[in-house]
Image (cartoon, grey):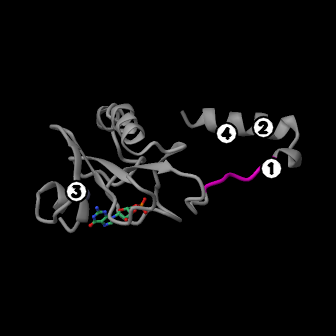
Amino acid sequence: MDCIFCKIIAGEIPSYKVYEDDNVLAFLDITQGTKGHTLIIPKKHIKNVYEIDEETIFNVFKVVPMISKALKKAFNPIGLNIINNNDQPHQSVFHFHIHLIPRYEDDGMILSTINNYDKYEPTYFNNLITKITNEM
Ligand code: 5GP
Ligand code: ZN
């Protein structure tokens, strides 16, 4: 399969391994957006959150606290972001992965949400809830 992360798992492409068990691999993101920027992936090839099964996502997320605490102890960041991109606009590798991004003062990373609260009435929020729960 032409998947760069499957090739990393198979050892066909080298990586800087942070952690490995039967189901998951964690390794340094090659770009090192900030110091310690780490990716956690399932060993099973799964495209993204729309295709992942509960057991596999559990296996990935269950190592998040352990690795996050190791990053905190190792580098003393002021915070840490956990990011997962699915499809557009940001997914560039189509093998499910979680980014652990330690944060530092003035690290240049821009991650923010927009506050649209003033634009909406309660009916808007209730309509959203109806639409979402109808799909469950
Ligand atoms: P996405 O944009 O899909 O959420 O993130 C994919 C990430 O994979 C990027 O941050 C990119 O730097 C990283 N990446 C892509 N190719 C390689 C590689 O060959 N080795 C490593 N370690 N990271 C990679
Ligand atoms: Zn893959």
Q: Nearer the viewer, mark 2 or mark 1?
A: 1
Q: In this view of the protein, which residue sits in the foreground, 39 or 131?
A: 39
Q: In this view of the protein, which residue sits in the foreground, 125 or 127?
A: 125
Q: Give x and y (percent) for residue 61.
A: 37, 35
Q: Which residues are magenta?
A: 111-116
Distance of label 4 from label 3 (alpha carbons): 43 Å
Q: Give x and y (percent) for residue 126.
A: 77, 33
Dot placed on the residue nearer the N-terminal end, 4 or 2: 2
The amino acid type of the residue labelled 3 equals Tyr
Return the residue at label 3.
Answer: 16
Mark 3 residue crowding within 10 angstroms, few (<14) / some (14–19) / many (20+): few
Up-down: is 57 above or below 4? above
Distance of label 4 from label 2 (alpha carbons): 10 Å
Left or right placement of residue 17 versus residue 80 in this view: left
Residue at (82, 44) in percent of width and height: 117
Dot placed on the residue nearer the N-terminal end, 2 or 3: 3
Q: Secondary structure at mark 1?
A: loop
The amino acid type of the residue labelled 4 equals Lys
Q: Quadrant of ligand 2?
A: bottom left
Distance of label 2 from label 1 (alpha carbons): 12 Å
Return the residue at label 4.
Answer: 131
Q: Nearer the viewer, mark 4 or mark 3?
A: 3
Whether label 4 lies within 8 Å of ligand 1 gets the answer no
Q: Are marks 4 and 2 in contact (CB under 8 Å)?
A: no
